[in-house]
Amino acid sequence: MDDGERRSGKRDRLARLTRLITVLRAHPDGVRVGELARRVDMSVRTVYRDLDAIDRELQVGVWSEGGLWGVAGEDFLPPLKLTLSEAMAVVLSARLMVRYADKYDPDLAAAFEKLEEGLPPVLAEHVDRTLGILSSLPRDERFRRHVHLLTRAWSERRVVSLDYDPPRHSRYGAVGERRRAVVRPYLIEPSLQTHALYLIGWDETRDGLRTFKIERILDAALTPRTFDPPEGGIEDSLWRAWDIIADQSEVEVVLRFAPTVAGRVEEATWHPTQRVEREPDGSLAWRATVSGTIEIRLWILSWGDEVEVLAPAALRDDVIATWRRALERYGEPAAG
């Protein structure tokens, strides 16, 4: 075996060990060797050998109990070994984060700096320019502190207590009041629509799934209590959300888009449940089942007079009332 083959073999082995650690990290309560073998597409014998190598050579503590295997320690995360295509995918994902962010995120900046190392010059320059944009955003230490605490709570499945200040005015219900909430953190999710970060979890105080805008959290603290994750996760609930809000009743929305924009609407998948059908006159019938109408309403209004709400009736009335208020505010157009 020549030196090139030997180096390639070492890289493949390191990639295999790293992937195995990643799977173990994703299962803090442990996972069986047979499942590990299936997830990483290796034999059970190879998995046992690699678990021993992770413990002895990489010095990452491995534990085994009752047939389950896991990794110990809180601070170790394996280094990323990315191909060019994988690095590009991460760059694009981080670019979306920068476009959504309205404040400086030092953790995102640090991730960018690590990603920049080893990239081809063109991509590295792009990352560097992105860092320049990110560094010009304002700082918010309270927000960062809360994100760190909630990230820890999420990863350790720890219940948190929150002092929360909801919006003072809402067109969809009573005025919110400051309150204390005890929450099981299920997910932290960014919203491109509102340029904000949200905590989604089970609110023990209200006995239901709730969405909390992290910018509105006044104070947060870890409790010693832990919780079991929801059976099947919450992906099914988020599947119905238009953006972030997943705690509303499901409703079917039916729209008709004018022929002038039908092609643009048809080119994208706006929601995983959407169904589209071209009408004889060139318009587009669009249907989807979403969690409430709060978020989709803003998207509908963004299309102006090139969309019509057919159902539900309450949403149609809401949009009509919105345009009437807008007309009253603007008045009749000035004479040309």
Image (cartoon, helix red, strand yellow):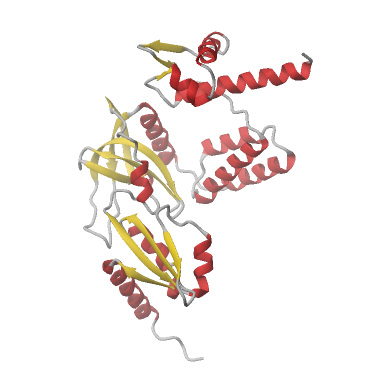
Q: Residue at x 38, y 13 (%)?
A: 67
Residue 216 at x, y = what percent? 34, 47
Picture mark count: 0
Q: Nearer the viewer, residue 305 or 36?
A: 36
Q: Residue pushed farthest bottom?
A: 335
187 lies above or below 168: above
Occupied quadrant, residue 125: top right
Occupied quadrant, residue 141: top left
105 lies above or below 329: above
Residue 144 at x, y = what percent? 44, 38
Does the rendering let one see residue 74?
Answer: no
| Residue 26 shown left or right of residue 117 in the figure | left
Does the rendering let one see residue 241?
Answer: yes
Q: Residue pushed farthest right?
A: 2
Q: Residue at x 51, y 58 (%)?
A: 268
303 lies above or below 98: below
Q: Residue at x 37, y 42 (%)?
A: 235
Q: Residue at x 47, y 77 (%)?
A: 281
| Residue 89 shown left or right of residue 100 in the figure | right
Occupied quadrant, residue 64: top left
Q: Nearer the viewer, residue 28 or 9?
A: 9
Quadrant of the snapshot with the N terminus: top right
199 lies above or below 240: above
Residue 131 at x, y = what percent? 61, 43
Residue 4 at x, y = what percent? 77, 20
Q: Nearer the viewer, residue 40 or 56?
A: 40
